[in-house]
Each structure stands twice: as structure tokens, then as C-alpha cells.
Amino acid sequence: MISSSRRLTRLFRGSSTACWRPRTAVLEASCRPPAPGEARDLPPAVRRYSPTAHVDGPISPGAMDELLGRAVAPVPSYETRDKAPPPPESLSADFMRFYAELDAERRATFLEKLSRGFGVDHAGVVELCGRLVDAQRRDPGTVLQAEDRLRYGLTPRYKRLLGHVARAEGGVKFLVDLRADLLGVLATQTHEGHHMRDLNGTLKSLLSEWFSVGLLQLQRITWQSPCEVLQKISQCEAVHPVRNWTDMKSRVGPYRRCYTFTHAAMPGEPLVVLHVALTEDISHNIQSIVREFTNLEAKEDVDKIRAAVFYSISSTQAGLQGVELGNYLIKRVVRELQVEFPHITQFSSLSPIPGFSSWLQGLLQAQSRKTEARGGGGPDCLSDRERREVEEATGSAPGAPSLEALRRVLASGDWVRSEALSRALEPALMRLCAWYLYGEKRRGYALNPVANFHLQNGATLWRLNWRADASPRGLAASCCIMVNYRYFLEETARNSALYLQERSVATSEEVLALVAQYQKNSKL
């Protein structure tokens, strides 16, 4: 039997850094949930009903209607709801097989038909609402029964089908992938989305129940873990792509930990993956974690482990978007690390800041227009001294053109190769980034999705790190800046409640000082 180490070595053999990049793209494509129209590996129970993995010939809307009419059973009456026999298992398998054979366009049509034609009986709901109103004049028992009838009547017809599909072999994974397709259709907005949004809400609710934390298994990944699991984790690393087998081995080696949640209904499938670096202090740049390999045979010196840094958390299933997994994984991992290293008191993320660069480009463009409209004058987002330094470093004239030159320099990434320009930009970019994380909101919560995730967990917006991610991805996404969200364990519950209920962001004095500078410069 070939060991995991030898098999992974064979997988990556001959993969230099240069040739690893295109291979990574292929592997990432193989790891993500199949796009609509792509063939899926069907479970054996479904394969018995599926002679082919994909059908290229036309499938008429009539065939869809016929299949849905058979697969989606009528809703039993309220009186017989607990006595109705389940539909034959073959119907669930037929449904899964039929859907798997559709291309992208036909899947969208199929989901539209399912959501629109097999949802809630709206006329029946209106009647039940009237009965509930009439019941208010009667005894409490009658009111409660009318409420229960209404609750039952509000259940979409397709919900029973989804429940039966989940019980089939491979059914839960199938529904996770189906929801990924549904989210893709909703994102394109090519269909009128009211009914499909309702289908998405029903699926999300079911998946949230099926993937509740009590049903998940925490698994630590090591170099001795099954080769297939190591391969999937390396393929699906979304934050800092794995370059080669040595890189992967380092990420599960000394002074590193890798944990994942798994589910009994999806064996061998990591659902969400958390990478942790065990360090002396809270790390301020990612290069020291993912670019500098440790001695893979080294013994860990416990005295050198005083901080746990969460440097990557990735969800591997697009269909589980919005299902709370990452928060619980971090909490479980903290407990595991406290058992292994009782002396650790510092827990923090080292997080990317996706979206900062695009937000900054929009801000600079708007500021440039304002400056031009008022006939010159310094832009609010830069101090006079910073403006002069930028003008000198870029060789541009004062006023709006200098701001436009700055926007072009940031867009091209050329500034990282100029020590003078980098030094001139640091205070302004750090100040702007602090405001972006602290002050830019969406419905009252942090606009940045990573910030919103950690703040919901109760973390503190603790420290910004200049040039912490010098990779092309870090440059393009966040001007090389990264952020630490610090987990003060005794404060996380309170911080989370304040953020969720009052939109209050727990923030360090260091970051608040940067925010105050931004507000002063912007005259807010």
C-alpha cells in the first residue's frame, strides 16, 4: 500500500513553482462544486437509474413537467400528515438523475419550474388565515390548532421532496450542489427570482438543520491523514493557494495545525478548513507563515508557542453559503488548542482585506471629481504633506491630476517598487484602510465580509499590518495590507452581542487613532 506521503509526492512530482500555478487552477476547478451543466459523480443508488452522466440531446419542458409531477408528491391533508406513506425511493433517484443530466440553461429552467409550480398553496393560505381570524373569538385550543394548520399550510410542496432526497444515498451532497446552482442562477438575475429566492431560503433552512454544530465532526489534518483528504484541502485552499507538496506538508507540520469539519452524510468531504500557525507572537505578515518553511522533522518547543494565529479559513462547499460553520470551527479549535497548550492566551486571525483596493479606487475617483469641480485644492483623503510627497514621487502637477495619477499608480501596483512612494503612501493607506474596516457599512454592519465574519464572532479589530501580503493577490485586493482580528476569549460573547444588536465594533486604540486621523482629514 502506498503511503500518503509517497502518493502526494507522486501527485506533485516535478511541480516547480512555475508549473504549479496552472495545475492549481485545474485542481481548484476540480474541487469546487460543479457549475450548472457540468457532469456530477452520481452515487451508486442514483447511478442505477442513470445510464449516462450527461445528456446532450434536447429535454423538453414537457419532460421536466412530467418528472416534477411524479417526483413532487401532493401535500397530505392536515389530518393525514403523519400517516401518509413516503414516496418510493426510486422517485428521489429519478429526480437526482434527471437534474444531473441537465445543462446550465435547462437547470435554471428546471429550478424555476420547481420553485414556481410546487411551492405554497397561496389560495389555501388565504383561507387558513381567515379561519385563524375567526378562531380568535373561541377558546385557546382552537386558536392554537388554527395556527398549527396555517403553519402546515405555509410549507412549500417541494420541501417534502427535498427531505426525501436527503435520505437517499448521496442525497445531502446532491442538495448542497443543487443550492450552489441555485445561488449561481440568482446571482445572474436572468430569471424572475421571487420563487427561487423562496426555494433558496427553504434549502438554506434545511441545510442549517442538517449541518448544525452537534452533527459535525472536528478532524485534525496531519501528514498521516488520507491522501484524498490532503489533496482536497490543498486544492480548495482559497486564501493562500498551496504551491507544491512541500508547502502542503509544511502547513500540517511542526508549529502548524489544520482542522476541518466533516459530516457523516458527506464522508471524505472537508466542509470548512481552518489553518493555524503556532507562534511566539501574533504574526504581522503572511510571508513568515506560508513562505518560510519550517524544518519538517523538527520537534515543537512548547515554550516558543505563545500565540495561535488563524491565517486561513475556507469553505469548500458553495452550496453551504450562509450556513454557520466557520464561527463554530474557530470556537472548537480554540478549545482543542487550550487542551494541547494550556498556556496559550493569545488568539488572533491574520486576515486579508478583500475589496479594499476597489473601494479605494472608487473613493479616489470621486475625490478627484470633487477637486476638479471646485477648481483645485488638496483632496480630503490626503494631508498636504502626503499630497506633496505623492506629487513629487509621481512627477505630477498639483491638484486633481495628482490624485488621478495616484489612482493609476495604485491600480498598476507600481508603487511597491518605489521606496519613496511606498513610504509616502503608508500613512494615508493605513488610515483609509482603518476607516474602510471600521466605518464603511452595509445595513449597519461592516461592509468587508471578512471583517463582518470576525466581528460577528466577537473578535476585536486589533491591528493593521503594512505590506503584510506582498503577493500579487494581496497587492490587487488590499494594497498589501492585512489585519489582525484579536480574540480576547473573556470578551468575545459581549463583543458579538454588541455588534449584532447595536452595530458596535470592538476596536483597539491603535486602530481608533487611525480612524480619528481619517475623520479629521475628511472633515466628517
Image: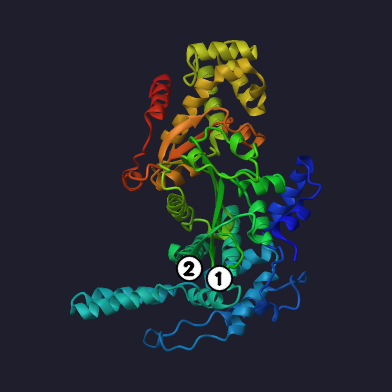
Tell me what residue is drawn at x 37 percent, y 38 percent: 505
Residue at numbered disc 1 = 265
Q: Is residue 272 left or right of residue 123?
A: right
Residue 318 x, y percent position in the rendering: 58, 57
Q: Is residue 47 left or right of residue 257?
A: right
The image quarter in which residue 368 lies? top right
Element under label 1?
A: loop
Q: How much space separates mark 2 and mark 1, taking CA atoms?
A: 9 Å
On screen, 315 above or below 146? above
- Callout 2, which amino acid? Trp
Observer able to see residue 32: no
- Callout 1, which amino acid? Ala
Count residues near mark 1 (Cα–Cα under 10 Å), then give few for <14, some for 14-19, many for 20+.
Answer: some
Question: Is mark 2 in CB contact (under 8 Å) with mark 1?
Answer: yes
User: Of discs 2 and 1, which sits in the foreground?
Assistant: 1
Quadrant into which the N terminus falls? bottom right
**First in sequence: mark 2 vs mark 1:** 2
Residue at numbered disc 2 = 210
Residue 513 x, y percent position in the rendering: 39, 25
Residue furthest right as drawn: 14
Q: Nearer the viewer, residue 252 or 353?
A: 252
The label number, if any, that marks residue 426 in the structure image = none
The image quarter in which residue 171 lies? bottom right
Residue 66 x, y percent position in the rendering: 63, 80
